Image (spheres, rainbow, N blue to C red):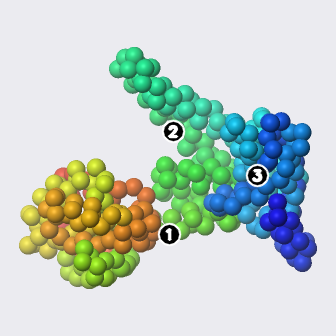
Amino acid sequence: MKKILLAALAALTLSPALAQRFCIEGVCDAKATKAYLRAIKTRDADSVEVVNGTFRFEGDAQGQTLFYVYSNAENNDAVRLIAEGDVRADLKQRTVSGTPENEAFSLWQKRLNEQEDIMREVAAVFKNPAQSQESSDSLRQALIQRYETAHTTLLALIKDCCEQNKQHVFPAFFLLENASMMERETVISLAEEGDPAYMKVKAASSLKNMIGAWKRQAVGVQFTDLEMADTEGKMHKLSEFVGKGKYVLVDFWASWCGPCRREMPHVKAAYEKYKDKGFDVVGLSFDQDKEAWTGAIQSLALPWHHLSDLKGWKCVAGEVYGINSIPATLLVGPDGKIVANNLRGDALEKKLEELLK
């Protein structure tokens, strides 16, 4: 609670227009002794004592806007809310109310919950070995179809929610959580068209950065340089290999990535066929273990350039290009402009055949 009180005192020195005051009154399981308030995309939480199943937070949100509130009861009772104005949080019923933002959020959350409940039900069947084994192939396919339909409907609802509520901040909860599963063009449109209020919250900065990185992968865009070390620890810029008159495949991979390893025979075949005709490969690894990285290069016999900063998913290659799943590739032209991305299987060789006739 100390941080909230300090924030409240600091807010007294601000003009009323800048302060983002809130009062959150809530109810929770009577067995709980503490309630917690945490802004999304942060780790630290403020806490207050729970008295007879009730709690109260008051202060200034300092621009954070989107929060989780939960108790230390055994059941998972976290709810999300917009910390502005007088808010009522019922952790037992999982509802929030009291302001137009929170009430609109609750209505849309209910619609999304219907699809999420279906997805959880199907997932529970597959997580239960006994039920999963007893299911016939036709039933399993029906369950998979049910899950996929619910997921498609969920993403469509999020799109509708954002398009219909650009004046509100609450759609940020849905868009930030699900952007990685949506079509990139859709996410970019929802984030940039109409100057939406939900993209002005602090937590949206990560999505803005991701969109910027996605745009660096777009066909026709000049490649963005970066620097990583080779297997001997010597630093190299990507520009040492790219934009020098050859078609270069920038291959994002890792030794622990099964699909990446299964893709390597296709890359090797293309490399052997076109290496003397103006084609090269640079592997940018998402490894953390140097021995695993260099061991995979040797065991798979990958004869091209290899770079890594051994930071896993936090590597500079992932941050610069917004890579959140591997394998992923960029095919860069002789002039340094991206000509294709994510060519898999025979598609790489076919594209090179077209380009290097």
**Residue 77 seen in render:** yes
Q: Mark 3 sits on what residue? A: 36
Instruction: Name the quadrant containing residue 32.
Output: top right
Q: Mark 2 sits on what residue? A: 152
Relative to 84, say whether 208 is above or below: below
Q: In front here: 232 or 332?
A: 232
Where is residue 299 shown, x and y percent of the image?
Answer: 16, 59
Q: Are marks 1 and 3 in contact (CB under 8 Å)?
A: no
Distance from the alpha carbon under mark 3 to that under mark 2: 33 Å
Identify the residue at image location x=9%, y=64%.
Answer: 272
Q: In front here: 47 or 214?
A: 47
Which comes before the other along the chain, label 2 or label 1?
A: 2
Q: In front here: 46 or 104?
A: 46
Amino acid type, callout 3: Tyr
Q: Is residue 44 left or right of residue 307?
A: right
Which comes before the other along the chain, label 1 or label 3?
A: 3
Under tag 1, what secondary structure? Answer: helix
Identify the residue at image location x=24%, y=77%.
Answer: 232
The N terminus lies in quadrant = bottom right
Q: Mark 1 sits on what residue? A: 212
Amino acid type, callout 2: Thr
Instruction: Name the quadrant containing residue 114.
Output: top right
Q: In front here: 331 or 234?
A: 234
Q: Is residue 339 left or right of residue 164?
A: left
Q: Is residue 12 left or right of residue 356?
A: right
